[in-house]
């Protein structure tokens, strides 16, 4: 008999690769944090000497969900200012709050809250963009969460850096050490947008990203206003600006990509640009609805992100996946657009591809890290189960997530965090609420 | 001291009427199933001799949610056929399955599953349209759930009635006895749509509904196809057909109302027609996005419905409310459209208005039935709480519903059903899955 550390036996297993496959009564064997086998449960019990046996007969085992775009620390600003138009939201609420509060401690506490929330809802990997990325990376390691940590690049002064040049210098440090070969942490550069980063900084960024072989993410064509402003300022749409600066290539991920011409979609395909789709954020800020089925038909890789909690307001991926599947149908005027299996891909392997992490996570495949999520289907809202993939996408609520493993580490068991002190997070969050909220809402009596 | 059966003390109470109000540390006193008082908790403890004290310091108390449109029994068809265009979905999946399975027992078991699911997600009143409405009514009484039971009217033969005429006769019986003055059950007529009910039947229906003083609900302008087909067949849009038949008045509720001209919206206002908005169903079937902010601006009463589980696929109202709030912003191109407080109204008092039940439910007001839902905010995804209304609409997941009362009866406690046997429902559902599903999904191996 061979040894495995953990054997997870599930009623259904959806490996995502191959596409659309549902395995019944299969087991996933894990050793040294990696998936070493996927076999029928009966066979597995004879083949392996098992350290820990996890028996989940009424559950669906899926790859851990990949949140391709968020600003984790903004959980602490959740609900501070809702139902405002984009510009007022940014200028009157978000930017002043960030200017006042976004320091190292806020980033640490907000990122802890975010990671805990994401784990509890089945996410095992997130791509983050926020100030103090070194704190984000440290916190992710501390909590054992897989993360793509983006170094923000922005011209204006923040508590973290005085200008874009300092952003780049700090980013370069983060990349080299201590995360060069880390099993959980990857890094990239995240210039905020073409309106907040100068051409000169983009050029320096391009050289640096090429030297260090790092990917670049950028908010792109999120709103019509952004595009119109760019045309007024430069005569070009933001994507054209990036193309002229030499940033359009297969290491580029466009976040949002709500407004695209057919020509731009063709250029995405030609250059290998990928997309992070954030449907709920796009709705909430009235940005519009991204043409997801068109992008997929053209061959663009599209991952799924929640965006930050100030514009969503939750970081749970099951609901984001459902929203994506529903919204794509209305946008494409076709009820067959983005079917369940494609939505699940978007929330897993396709997201991993947008981050360049598909060789290590995003599907249940031998050799990859054991980033796994087990979902309990014995809830009334998920019954009956005619089609497990449909049920996962169209019915599952976050609290049905019973287990989560990150690199083989059992992070959520019985729907509760195993290694993370939830009460401590709640306590710190309450302190921030006192500080940031100041006093009770003015509607209260 | 005065007596009350139950005193519910909540950290926050959102009565919905008056609009936008948040009461902190208030208590709701309940006697004989009705709300008798809403007072500061400190005062309540001195004023009342309390039967059962419910202390919920970290919770928000809201009116029970009102699901203004569903087909409850279709829970048993949940996930049977997803990602299909509307016509194929109806003709190849739903109608054949209904023809085969929709008998009295299926309706009883499916409705039980639906009521249990709705209660667990904070809903205390639903408006149903399905065959065997007498079974729906019986089941709602049996489970102590408030229901508006619609008698379906359709020309073609079903297991329940051979034609529209028999539908009307059976509906008239249901209305008279035993539900004429029932505290939980109200009744109405629900002609399926203008394409499936003849002019003659509509005329008979109008006379009957007038005589019995009953409201009428109808699927209206759900898809472009429906409108185009009507124009081809009659030269008129479906709403115009109804208007010519004399059915357009303040007792009419239009379900869906996705596609409306400005003139039609004006006519809605003039005649007092209300709307049941079903955003997730409209997305899933690629029907489009209803112009909700336009309807509200014009003064139309709009409630919120989940539609049936075959086109959603869940009956939980918190997520439907969030989707409505998000989607209205994209449709109106305005991030300030359908703000949180308005979305909560839609899911409560406005829904009650569309059913003619606003004098007895839909807000926390003295004299109304104690239809109440208590939501636990001490979940990471709802923290911090700057604005309780925002958090309820934009962050709450169904399992945060800790308590539900219907007419003062404690139906959900600690997130579990108190008087309903969940395991029995799961067992019956599994039996139906065996029967209806026949064999394992063809993707399975």
Image (tube, coloured by chain):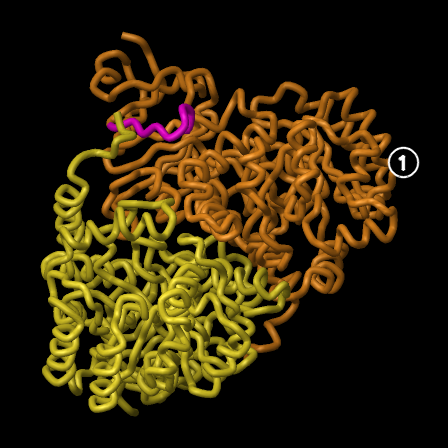
Chain colours: A orange, B yellow
Residues packed near mark 1 inside 10 Å, few (<14), some (14 to 19) or many (20 plus): few
Residue on which the image places disc 1: A200
Q: Residue at x 54, y 35 (%)?
A: A297
Location of residue A411 (image quadrant): top left
Quadrant location of the N terminus of chain A in the rendered image: top left
- The segment highlighted magenta reads A16-24
- Single out the residue that lies furthest toward the top: A1
Give x and y (percent) for residue B203.
25, 82
In the image, taking residue A97 as reference, residue B314 lies left or right, namely left
Answer yes or no: is residue A379 visible. Answer: no
Q: Is A23 in the magenta?
A: yes
Q: Residue at x 31, y 9 (%)?
A: A2
Location of residue B298 (image quadrant): bottom right
* A310 up-or-down from B26: above or below: above
Q: Is A270 in the magenta?
A: no
In the image, taking residue A111 as reference, residue B51 lies left or right, namely left
Q: Residue at x 50, y 36 (%)?
A: A346
In the image, taking residue A107 as reference, residue B281 lies left or right, namely left
């Amino acid at each position: 008999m061979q040894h495995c550390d953990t054997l997870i036996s599930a009623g259904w297993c959806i490996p995502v690769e191959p596409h659309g496959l549902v395995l019944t009564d299969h087991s996933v064997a894990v050793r040294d944090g990696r998936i070493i086998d996927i076999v029928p449960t009966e066979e597995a019990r004879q083949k392996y000497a098992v350290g820990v046996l996890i028996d989940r007969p009424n559950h669906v085992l899926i790859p851990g969900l990949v949140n391709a775009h968020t600003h984790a620390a903004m959980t602490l600003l959740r609900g501070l200012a809702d139902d405002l138009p984009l510009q007022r939201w940014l200028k009157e609420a978000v930017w002043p709050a960030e200017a006042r509060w976004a320091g190292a401690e806020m980033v640490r506490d907000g990122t802890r809250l975010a990671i805990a929330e994401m784990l509890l809802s089945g996410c095992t990997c997130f791509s983050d963009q926020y100030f103090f990325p070194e704190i984000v990376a440290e916190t992710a390691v501390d909590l054992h969460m897989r993360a793509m940590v983006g170094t923000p690049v922005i011209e204006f002064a923040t508590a973290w850096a005085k200008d874009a040049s300092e952003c780049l210098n700090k980013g370069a440090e983060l990349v080299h050490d201590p995360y060069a070969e880390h099993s959980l942490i990857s890094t990239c550069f995240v210039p905020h947008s073409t309106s907040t980063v100068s051409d000169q900084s983009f050029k320096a960024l391009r050289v640096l990203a090429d030297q260090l072989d790092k990917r670049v993410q950028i908010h792109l064509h999120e709103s019509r206003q952004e595009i119109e402003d760019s045309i007024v300022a430069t005569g070009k749409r933001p994507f054209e600006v990036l193309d002229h600066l030499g940033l359009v290539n297969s290491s580029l991920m466009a976040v949002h990509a709500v407004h695209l011409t057919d020509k731009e979609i063709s250029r995405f395909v030609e250059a290998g640009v990928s997309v992070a789709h954030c449907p709920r954020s796009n709705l909430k800020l009235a940005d519009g609805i991204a043409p997801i089925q068109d992008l997929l038909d053209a061959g663009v890789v599209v991952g799924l992100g929640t965006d930050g909690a100030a514009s969503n307001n939750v970081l749970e991926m099951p609901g984001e996946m459902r929203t994506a599947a529903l919204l794509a149908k209305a946008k494409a005027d076709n009820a067959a657009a983005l079917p369940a299996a494609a939505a699940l891909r978007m929330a897993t392997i396709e997201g991993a591809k947008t981050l360049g992490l598909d060789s290590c996570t995003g599907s249940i495949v031998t050799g990859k890290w054991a980033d796994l999520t087990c979902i309990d289907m014995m809830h009334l809202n998920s019954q009956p189960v005619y089609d497990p993939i449909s049920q996962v996408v169209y019915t599952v609520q976050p609290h049905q997530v019973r287990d989560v493993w990150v690199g083989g580490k059992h992070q959520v068991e019985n729907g509760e965090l195993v290694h993370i002190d939830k009460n401590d997070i709640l306590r710190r969050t309450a302190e921030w609420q006192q500080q940031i909220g100041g006093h009770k809402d003015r509607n209260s009596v």
